[in-house]
Amino acid sequence: MQFRWRKYRRGRLSLLQATLVRAVLLIGAVTMAVPFGWMVCTALKDKRTMDSEPYRWLPKMPSADPTVSWSVDYLSASTPDFEDVVLRDFDETAAGDDRAARQGAGSLSMAVDFAADQTPDRTIDLSSAELPDTPVSMLAFWLRGDGSGHHLRVTVHGDGFVYRADDLPVGFEGWKEVHCYFRQEQFDPLGREVVPLRRDPPGDGGYVSLRSIRKVELTAVAEPLWSRAWQRWTYSFRKAWQSMPFGRFYLNSLFVSLAVTLGQVLTSALAGYAFARLKWPGRDKFFLMYLATMMIPAAVTIVPTFVLMKMLGWFDTYRALILPLLFSAYGTFMLRQFFLSLPADLEDAARIDGCGKLRVWLHVILPLSKPALATLATFTFLGCWGAFQWPLFATQSMHMKVLPIGLSAFQDKFSVQYNLMMAASLIVMVPTLAVFLFNQRFFTRGIQLSGMKE
């Protein structure tokens, strides 16, 4: 079998040529898929697995043993001024090995065997403690997990109130700080476990008087193996979503990206039509001047644009995120070049039928330009969805942040929480994949002009 690339004719590949082409394409696909596979596998692991077994592709399955071996230490409360009030450090009630303590000399043991019908709860009595009469926003304690995946339930009893927390899956190993908030919408991107406390019966949540708290009840709740496995595999996704107001970030990014995309497509289509089809004095010179703005780096215009937004009173608003990005020299150039390639006969026929310039643009030019419009919309949406620099300058409050700024919160000066960052990145990728899959059919579709012959 002879291998003759120079004698290749379209549609006639030899068996060896076809095999080599498919092998090269397969190798390229695998090469591109490996980083994505690593990203997915990293998102399925927790931080301890990342630190101890970084080369492990998938997390371990939880043990089928129906037991837990937890320890609790250093129960404290936090005031509105972020001052900690130590409630119990369990020095005098040490249970087990002293080396298991997080603070002081001992810890409260929670070793439970669900098969033996042991008592699965521990009660921390605070009624006899001399507590100050100060409002507190949360209770915190250190919990040493065993990675079993069974749940911990926290209940706070007080004078005339009971607060119950959502079950906390203890899928981690080692000591970790648990924050139980009386106030809602508390977020922590630093890797702590955060559980909200809800009043039972429902009532107004907020600050609670520390002196009115009587006891804290910790209960171990058994979970089936499949549930614990699911909790472990989705831990990073749930933790990334709960660490900050990702829902609000999602709405902000989606609204801003859609508004900028629609605005850029509209303004670029109008400007491109004016530069391509309309004849007016100085048209080409103005187009070159407009095109020259592409040579100005975006970083140079950030400070003047920021000052303008402050003067107009638009700082930290949607107007500051949207209006400066509604015009694009690149989009105008691309659509102008596409409009120039359209046959003039259709435009002349529309004018004979009585269409004006705007109706020709709306009913003739735009329907024939769907591939170019879809391409520009895709590029604009992807660029705005991943924009970081301008939203960082244009916003200040938490409710105006966008997704790229939220992703940066998983990285600080000393460490990077790769599992949470990869999980959040996969969540952020969903709209971009949807936009690409929806618009990809326009990339290869040609302009079909039935009955036209040039």
Image (spheres, grey):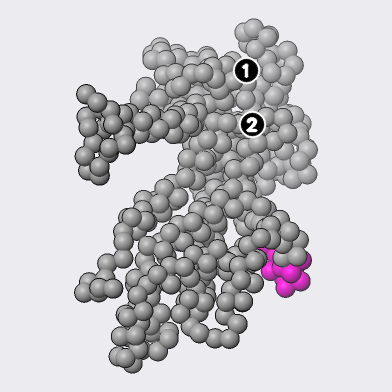
Q: Which residue is mark 2?
A: 416
Task: Assess whether residue 172 is covered by the magenta stretch.
Answer: no
Alpha carbons under labels 2 and 1: distance apart: 32 Å
Where does the image place residue 257, in percent across and percent down from the top left?
Answer: 52, 59
Q: Where does the image place residue 120, in percent across and percent down from the top left? A: 48, 20
Q: Nearer the viewer, residue 144 or 84?
A: 144
The spot of residue 178 in percent (x, y) is 61, 31
Q: Vertically, is 312 above or below 430?
A: below
Q: Which residues are magenta?
A: 307-320
- Residue in view at x 51 percent, y 18 percent: 55
Residue 290, percent from left and from top = 62, 71
From the viewer's perspective, tell me whether residue 281 is left or right of residue 452.
right
The mark total stands at 2
Residue 108 circle label: 1
Q: Is residue 151 shown above or below 281?
A: above
Which residue: 46% across, 21% down? 57
Amino acid type, callout 1: Leu
**Residue 44 visible in the displayed image:** no
- Note whether 38 is above or below 299 in the view shown: above
